[in-house]
Amino acid sequence: DAKTTQPPSMDCAEGRAANLPCNHSTISGNEYVYWYRQIHSQGPQYIIHGLKNNETNEMASLIITEDRKSSTLILPHATLRDTAVYYCIVRVATGNTPLVFGKGTRLSVIA
Amino acid sequence: DAGVIQSPRHEVTEMGQEVTLRCKPISGHDYLFWYRQTMMRGLELLIYFNNNVPIDDSGMPEDRFSAKMPNASFSTLKIQPSEPRDSAVYFCASRPGRYSLAKKKGTDTQYFGPGTRLTVL
């Protein structure tokens, strides 16, 4: 699985959009970008995933650059409850190996 | 569905004692994973099962750790004897199989339990 690079921490004002970047310059053609988050004292939670097209669901939007070497997770209207560690993971969708979690980005949403 | 269930939620024990952590995966999921999380090492995979069979236990720290999955609805992680450095939060997660109906969500979507916070004194 390709490696990812994320900033260790970010702040965001409540109500504003939170844009979390992820670099994955060694991504291969059959690898997806997955995002999980972990709120304090809870297990990680799936957010969204994509291959090359932008994706949106009820939680977030995922923007993947045309060359697929980087992506951005967007929380359109961040709330205090979005304060968490966000993990960007790259891997084959049907891979039989487990997810590997890096250090992620600690997002702090500030009132 | 109640999600992945873990018990106990908190466990405090003394060094040398046996500890057993329990997990009930989501019904119908073919994969089960045990993770450990500490401040120093982050989230680490210990072992995972596919259809109740252990597939990869290379993350198990040493022989003091063992895991079983006697049936599709139950798994245990045992530490015997426990040591203070085993103190961590232990998560269990499950995932649908490759050809499940959850394909539209991505077969790599793992569902995590609330974790067991283990403290070994």
Image (cartoon, coloured by chain):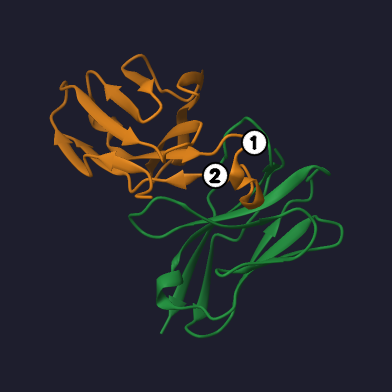
Chain colours: A green, B orange
Side of B88 relative to A101 (left or right): left
Neighbours of disc 2 within 10 Å: few (<14), some (14-19), many (20+): some
Mark 1 residue element: loop
Residue drawn at x 23%, y 24% is B82
Q: What chain does mark 2 sit on?
A: A
Asked where in the image residue B93 lies, by quadrant, the reply is top left
Q: Give, as a three-letter code, the residue at label 2.
A: Phe
Residues indicated by labels 1 and 2 sit on the same polypeptide chain: no
Mark 2 lies on residue: A101
Tell me if residue A32 can be seen: yes
Residue A62 sits above or below residue B80 on the image: below
Residue B48 sits above or below residue B6 on the image: above
Residue A29 sits above or below residue A20 on the image: above
Q: CA distance from mark 1 to mark 2?
A: 24 Å
Mark 1 lies on residue: B99
Q: Residue furthest right?
A: A67
Q: Nearer the viewer, residue A46 or A16?
A: A46
Residue drawn at x 50%, y 24% is B51
